[in-house]
Amino acid sequence: MSALAFTLRRLGAMVLLLLVLSFLCFALLGLSPGSPEQLLLGTRPATPELLATLRAENHLDEPFLMRYWYWIEGVLHLDLGKSVQTQQNVLDMIVERLPITATLALYSTLIALVVAIPAGLISGSRRSGGTDRAVTFAALVSISAPPFALGLLLLYGFAVLLGWFPVYGAGETFIEMVYHLTLPSLTLAAGSAAVIVRQLRATVIDVIGKDFMTFARARGLSPIRIQVVYLLRNSSLPMLTMSGLLLSGSLAGAVVVEQAFGLAGVGNLLVKAVGQLDIPVVQALALLTGAAVILINLLVDLAYLAIDPRLRHPRSAT
Amino acid sequence: MADLSVDRLTISHRGETLVREVTLRIGAGETVALVGESGSGKSLTARAAAGLLPDGLTARGSVVFDGRQLIGRPERELRTLRGRRIGLLLQDPFTMLNPMLTAGTHIAETLPRALGRAARRAEVTRRLAEVGITDPSVADRYPFQLSGGMCQRVAMAAALAGDPDLLIADEPTTALDTTVQREVLDLLTRLRESRGMGLLLITHDLRVAFDTCDRVLVMYAGSILEEAPAARLAERAGHPYTAGLLTAMPSVRHRRATLTGIPGRVPRAAEVAGRCVFTSRCGHADDRCGASAPEPRPVGAGHLVACHRQAEIAGLLSRPSPPAEKAPATAASGPRPAVARVSGLRKEYRVRRSAPPVVALGGISLTIGDGESVGLVGESGSGKSTLSRCLLGLTRPTAGTIAVDGVAQCVFQDPYTSLNPAHTVGFALREALGRRPADGEVPPSEADLLDLVGLPAEYGRRRPVALSGGERQRVAIARALAVRPRLLICDEPVAALDVSVQAQVLELLRRVNRELGTSLLFITHDLAVVRQVTDRLVVLYHGEIVEEGPTESVLDRPGHAYTRRLLASAPQETAV
């Protein structure tokens, strides 16, 4: 199977998954307690005219599958409906908030990788040494620290006491945003970094004992080359999977951090929408998060192909 | 040109000695073999000589290369020596190369100076040609796309890319097929001669050592017991251990009346401090041997023996038993009922739906008579394992019929993975006895079975982890015999065992065949081993039987070109 066929197959699978996901999201409306009309009414008074309009707008008299068809048609035309609470266009609401959450997720994953890769490599190569113990301990602490507590601690230390970073808000320009999002990203990165370090350390311990590592040293290759091309590249696949999972997780998991740092992100929106039973918003966000997870997985799979030639060139039959 | 001298090298791990006071010297362009069984410390010695001991191991003593002390030298300085002055080649061609890099990259990254793209490509092609790979497109292939022999050649080209003065080769041919083994050894010899390079060859096989090297050192339990020029060692081994190894070595030229191994097992180096390390297994040991470690003493030109009683026992050392006079008794008695009859057996594998199927067996017919011992030889990919799996019913043939009369059992190659580590030996045997078909006779007890394979009854309480490789293989045989099979299929049963233990297991299998009348199908790549155990020989090549006949006549007068090639590839036996 060539790389192209692999990509096409994954894309096909992705479309199929998205369809299933969209169906489940749509079914949310039917599964929620209360009648659809009540949910769609929101805070508005239930006049017969409004009820009739809602029934017509949402095709509530049609069978379930037809309603799904109308909905998915709308979604494909970027029409995600209106918030029942604010009557705002759902797409606009999300587009407004997405940059913060996306930046937060990417930024924190980047920080996690920058910290975790060297730490994992060193920790795994000098097993049971002083550095390894320190790294393992730090990882344990980061994994155990609850994000809200860590967030508050960082806020107090770096924003209040030292005054290096802002306490509140997300900033306007990109530079400002990076500056504002540093502390929240650090908070989010701590747990991810710890997971990646532990994963990488375990793989490195395995890879470092392989014959090709000895053979590389025996040929006098430079330490940098051995670390990167031999050790890191051969240890990177499990780490990559983990990073993909963490990145998709941080999209949804930004909720707590956004709350702690007062950021108006997607997580924040989700919490509000669930609390107010704002079904169209919840549907859209569930679809968005699911699509992001599927897309990230696809990217991880493609990265696999780029890194490991064994996947590009399956062993020939003879 | 430079020489290596190792003086009183001691390697230890957390205070436990693994290698004790090893002294050896390799002059410029000289070839020296370091021979020993598993656990003898030969590979550690080689790693220490390249400054590449695994983490946690410490070396004391001295390793001087080209006038420079390597022990205690910082990694940064060692790195400039590695590859360019001292090269190291490892055993397993598949794990030695980085699976993420092409063959060409492995060679290019080791070249001593940076070259332009085109010049580098030309140099890689030239280096590949040097190791006998004339197809330049191999440079763009990945290790997993190449055969074991090809990988070993690429690794050799990579190890030699820095043009070292000394190459340390750690069992470079052990993982390869016989014919490929021969080619790689010849290539190694040729490269060494054309480059005037020194060679330290680490091997468990005395025949390979005699074949390739000027001088041979014999190592056991972390110490060097004997050192001599190859030809002299083959003629008159001075140490009881070396003599024992030579006696245990099977011969491809004749069947020995009895196969004698060395009793007991290899001790850990730390257990035998302060005495002769071979005492516990030596038939000539006396009080002195247990009291102090003997120093190596010269007994001839370049011949050193570390044995207290060398002078007294020189004439008594064991020699290989004489060839059996005639064909063994079981072979002669004419036609007999068949235990297994295979006809037109064909097996195809489909790798992909779109690709044509791979033919593992191309329609072969074979009959194994009652009490007969049949050898099946061929290299990897010849279909010999597929045949055994079909006979055992583990895989369904594509076409053809198999009729097995009674029970067939199997003894596998690796005794370390074929026994369940969680169960005691006794449990494994009782479990097998429970599946013995009722035949009106009183079934043997667990102790009877252990006795049958030459193990004391108390082994029933042990778990596999407490057993050596040879002992585990005996247990595996006992377990197979528990169900009273008519046919015992042995798939490379001694390939993973040391020479001294190999002989014992082979002798046991001969006894099983002779005394219990169990038919044997003995699958192996080793012609010397097959000669010792079988009456009839079947040569398999690319899924077809290319030659078949009484073992002696096939090996003495091979008819097919492939059989002749196999025979020519077997290591020479200067010892016999």
Image (spheres, coloured by chain):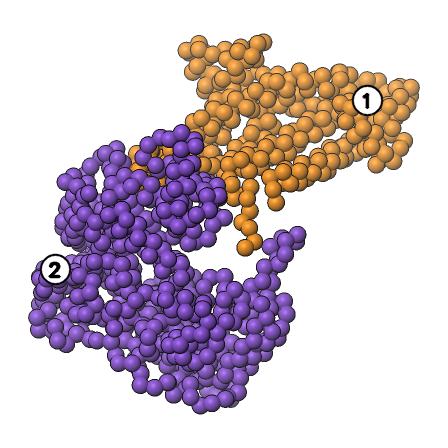
- Please, is residue B368 above or below residue A193 in the view? below
In the rendering, which numbered label is found on residue B302? 2
Q: Identify which residue is drawn at 56% across, 63% down.
A: B360
| Secondary structure type for disc 2 | loop
In this view of the protein, can residue A308 be seen by the observer? yes
- Please, is residue B299 above or below residue A130 in the view? below
Q: Chain of mark 1?
A: A
Mark 2: amino acid: Gly
Q: Identify which residue is drawn at 46% across, 61% down.
A: B380
Mark 1: amino acid: Leu
In this view of the protein, can residue B53 be seen by the observer? no
Chain ID, purple in image: B
Residue B469, by quadrant, is bottom left
Position of B275 compared to A186: left or right?
left
Q: Residue B506: give x, y in percent of width and height.
A: 35, 74
Q: Identify which residue is drawn at 56% across, 72% down.
A: B364
Q: Look at the image and tell me in which quarter the N terminus of chain B lies.
A: top left
